[in-house]
Image (tube, rainbow, N blue to C red):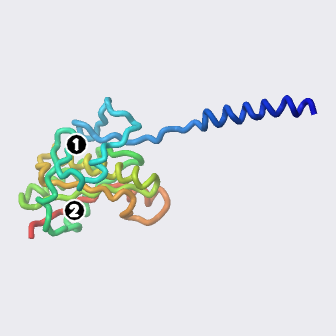
């Protein structure tokens, strides 16, 4: 009986301490948006910050900028015909939780830039995509950072940024419906959609 009276305050104190401190949570890593150099991550951006709300919804501000690259207004892209097949061979893929364009993908960026230089009236839509892991909000932000990284790389390759729009589909448009690393590798991508004037 005497032992129970001593143990009860200790149990209550332990419970109160655990309730007050809570569980330690490891912050989720967020891939920062590429900075002035394509494929480089700015040192001054925290790994635990998401891009501003405008990058999650490109329709919110038609002139959102990434670094020093301006974005064209949506009205300039209205009524254009999508040609998904024209540049399908030049899809670029990303590593897990990354928006950094791999060196092996630079040839595809050059090919897209070359295709756009052939007809100045054509424009480009870059669709950023992710695999199924992660929350919808996180994947939308990551897909947008991937699309913006490709836009930055194309701008450095000589494509005028006012000919390019980006959109993120997050995990909503998988290229492969599987649930393994092979499928996930195919789904972490940017698709390039050529836009022709009507």
Residue 62, position as x, y percentages in the image: 18, 52
- Answer above or below: position of 19 versus 186: above
Residue 91 visible in the picture: no
Residue 87 visible in the picture: yes
- Secondary element under disc 2, as helix, strand or loop, is strand
Residue 149, position as x, y percentages in the image: 26, 46
- Secondary element under disc 1, as helix, strand or loop, is loop
Q: Name the residue under label 2.
A: 193
Instruction: Identify the image quadrant of residue 10.
Output: top right
What residue lies at 27% left-to-right and 51% top-to-bottom?
147
From the image, state whether disc 2 or disc 1 is nearer to you.
Answer: 1
What residue lies at 33% left-to-right and 46% top-to-bottom?
99
Q: How far apart are marks 2 and 1 (CA)?
A: 20 Å
Q: In what quadrant of the picture does the C terminus appear?
A: bottom left
Q: Toward the viewer: 118 or 75?
A: 75
Q: In what quadrant of the picture does the N terminus appear?
A: top right
Q: Mark 1 points at which residue?
A: 66
- Category of crowding for the residue at label 1, using alpha-carbon neighbours closer than 10 angstroms: few (below 14), some (14–19), many (at least 20): some
Which sits earlier in the primary sequence, circle 2 or circle 1? Answer: 1
- Answer above or below: position of 109 versus 177: above
183 sits to left or right of 118: right
């Amino acid at each position: 009986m005497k032992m129970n009276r001593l143990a009860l305050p200790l149990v209550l104190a332990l419970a109160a301490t655990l309730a007050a401190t809570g569980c330690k949570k490891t912050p989720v890593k967020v891939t920062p948006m590429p900075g002035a150099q394509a494929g480089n991550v700015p040192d001054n951006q925290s790994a635990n910050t998401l891009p501003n709300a405008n990058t999650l919804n490109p329709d919110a501000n038609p002139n959102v900028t990434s670094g020093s690259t301006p974005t064209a207004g949506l009205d300039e892209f209205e009524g254009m015909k999508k040609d998904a097949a024209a540049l399908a061979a030049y899809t670029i893929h990303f590593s897990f939780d990354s928006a950094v364009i791999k060196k092996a993908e630079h040839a595809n960026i050059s090919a897209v830039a070359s295709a756009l230089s052939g007809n100045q009236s054509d424009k480009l839509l870059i669709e950023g995509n992710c695999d199924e892991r992660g929350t919808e909000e996180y994947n939308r932000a990551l897909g947008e950072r991937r699309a913006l990284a490709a836009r930055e790389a194309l701008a450095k390759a000589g494509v005028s940024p006012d000919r390019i729009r980006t959109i993120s589909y997050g995990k909503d448009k998988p290229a492969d419906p599987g649930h393994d690393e092979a499928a996930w590798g195919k789904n972490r991508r940017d698709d390039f959609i050529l836009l022709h004037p009507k």
